[in-house]
């Protein structure tokens, strides 16, 4: 019980601190996820030693389930804040980001991991798949709130939101292929991947998400029309059905993250609420109550000793992946990403592809299946580097983008 009480106190104080300083934090070099991670390090085994996840239960299981729940809540917030008009305007560049660009980021990351860490082919592909998806939770700290609305046009904010929301679920098929190859003979691995991961995992996930999202939208509309609800909270309602979607998809063996995002996305498209809360209130509430504790837990669980043992190759791999995983790929596909995105938009999106909670989830899943700690050691280092680097550059790069945009007279949303 002492561990629980200390954890509650530390996490609660972190949420309060971030809430009191939220406006100043958005404009600074230290973003909300960074603060939470530092708190976790400070109270964890490599700091004051107050908290140790190993005393809560099996560490990998704790991280996996905490990340899964955090992603479900975070993905719902992302889906709800996407403007309906953006879907029509951005479908082509987002499709490219979710297909060709995602594949390119996966292969480049795998090559860098194999070169820097000297690991086998399929293990390199697995580590790369874990860090390929853009994280919606870390991205939300960059593209939501008054500071982002003031400096970034809607097309940029929604492009990052659409991509980060959808590719967390799609990363499932990238992660499962090398993981199955490391566990089974090649022919059996391909069969399992096509049937269980692609057909059952992704296709059934899409069906589950669409059905639940549409049903939830119609249910709330019906209840309001009949006067069955006295006062409706969109956040409370959507958090509840995100959990329903998460549980239902897991029970069906589907890709739960994809189901949750699609359910929120369809709910967003199918509702026409005049009193719908704005994106800042929804996402800020979700972030402070659900996502910051995840980053505190991540800070506690960081394998700093293993990082030191792996040495310079791990540091070089993390830096190279952050610099080369995404910007060159978006440069290659620049002609396909234009209209409505502009050159400066693509440059901004090319840099801000943060790695976070989704990678924590997939790294924990891979570690629990393969019992190879190297996946967690490498992925956690890359995640930590991304949280630090993307966090420190968020405010100055956003201001720089806004100055460039207004000098060019770009006033389009």
Image (tube, rainbow, N blue to C red):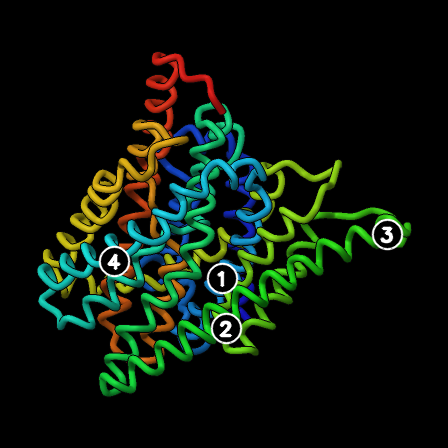
Q: Which residue is mark 4?
A: 106
Q: Which residue is mark 3?
A: 229
Q: How far across and down, in percent of the image, does residue 329 sit?
A: 23, 45
Q: In terms of image quadrants, where is residue 91? A: top left
What residue do we see at 52% from left, 68% from top? 205
What residue do we see at 36% from left, 76% from top? 194
Residue 35 makes an appearance in the image: no
Q: Residue furthest right?
A: 227
Seen in the picture, residue 324 relative to 185 is either above or below; the reply is: above
What residue do we see at 42% from left, 79% from top? 196
Residue 240 makes an appearance in the image: yes
Q: Which residue is mark 1?
A: 258
Q: Which residue is mark 2?
A: 254
Front-most of residues 221 and 42: 221
CB under 8 Å between callouts 1 and 2? yes
CB under 8 Å between callouts 4 and 2? no
Q: Secondary structure at mark 4?
A: helix
The local crowd at label 2, few if under 14, some if 14 to 19, many if 20 or more residues have their Cα within 10 Å, is many
Circle 3 or circle 2, nearest the eye: 2
Query: Between disc 4 and disc 2, whose residue precedes?
Result: 4
Q: How far across and down, in percent of the image, does residue 345 sit?
A: 35, 30
């Amino acid at each position: 019980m002492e561990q629980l009480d200390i954890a509650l106190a530390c996490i609660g104080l972190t949420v309060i601190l971030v809430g009191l300083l939220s406006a100043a934090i958005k404009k600074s070099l230290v973003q909300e996820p960074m603060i939470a991670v530092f708190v976790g390090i400070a109270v964890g085994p490599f700091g004051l030693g107050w908290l140790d996840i190993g005393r809560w239960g099996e560490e990998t299981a704790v991280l996996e389930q905490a990340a899964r729940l955090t992603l479900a809540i975070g993905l719902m917030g992302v889906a709800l804040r996407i403007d309906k008009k953006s879907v029509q305007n951005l479908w082509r560049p987002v499709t490219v980001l979710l297909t060709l660009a995602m594949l390119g980021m996966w292969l480049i990351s795998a090559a860098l991991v194999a070169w820097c860490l000297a690991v086998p082919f399929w293990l390199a592909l697995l580590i790369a798949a874990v860090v390929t998806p853009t994280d919606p939770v870390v991205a939300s700290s960059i593209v939501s709130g008054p500071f982002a609305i003031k400096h970034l046009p809607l097309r940029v904010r929604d492009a990052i939101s659409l991509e980060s929301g959808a590719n967390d679920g799609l990363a499932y098929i990238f992660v499962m292929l090398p993981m199955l190859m490391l566990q089974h003979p090649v022919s059996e691995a391909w069969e399992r991947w096509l049937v269980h991961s692609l057909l059952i995992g992704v296709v059934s996930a899409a069906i589950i998400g669409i059905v639940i999202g549409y049903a939830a939208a119609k249910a709330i509309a019906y209840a309001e029309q009949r006067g069955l609800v006295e006062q409706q909270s969109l956040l409370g309602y959507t958090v509840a059905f995100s959990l329903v979607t998460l549980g239902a998809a897991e029970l069906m063996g589907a890709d739960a993250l994809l189901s949750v995002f699609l359910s929120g996305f369809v709910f967003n498209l199918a509702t026409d609420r005049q009193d719908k809360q704005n994106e800042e209130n929804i996402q800020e509430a979700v972030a402070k109550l659900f996502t910051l504790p995840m980053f505190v837990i991540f800070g506690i669980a960081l394998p700093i000793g293993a990082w030191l043992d792996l040495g310079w190759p791990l540091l070089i791999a993390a830096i190279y992946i952050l610099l080369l995983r995404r910007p060159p790929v978006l440069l290659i596909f620049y002609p396909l990403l234009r209209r409505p995105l502009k050159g400066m938009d693509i440059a901004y999106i090319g840099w801000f592809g943060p790695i976070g909670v989704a990678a924590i989830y997939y790294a924990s899943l891979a570690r629990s299946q393969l019992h190879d700690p190297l996946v967690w050691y490498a992925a956690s280092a890359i995640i930590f580097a991304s949280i630090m680097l993307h966090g420190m550059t968020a405010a100055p790069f956003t201001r720089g983008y806004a100055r460039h945009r207004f000098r060019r007279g770009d006033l389009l949303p």
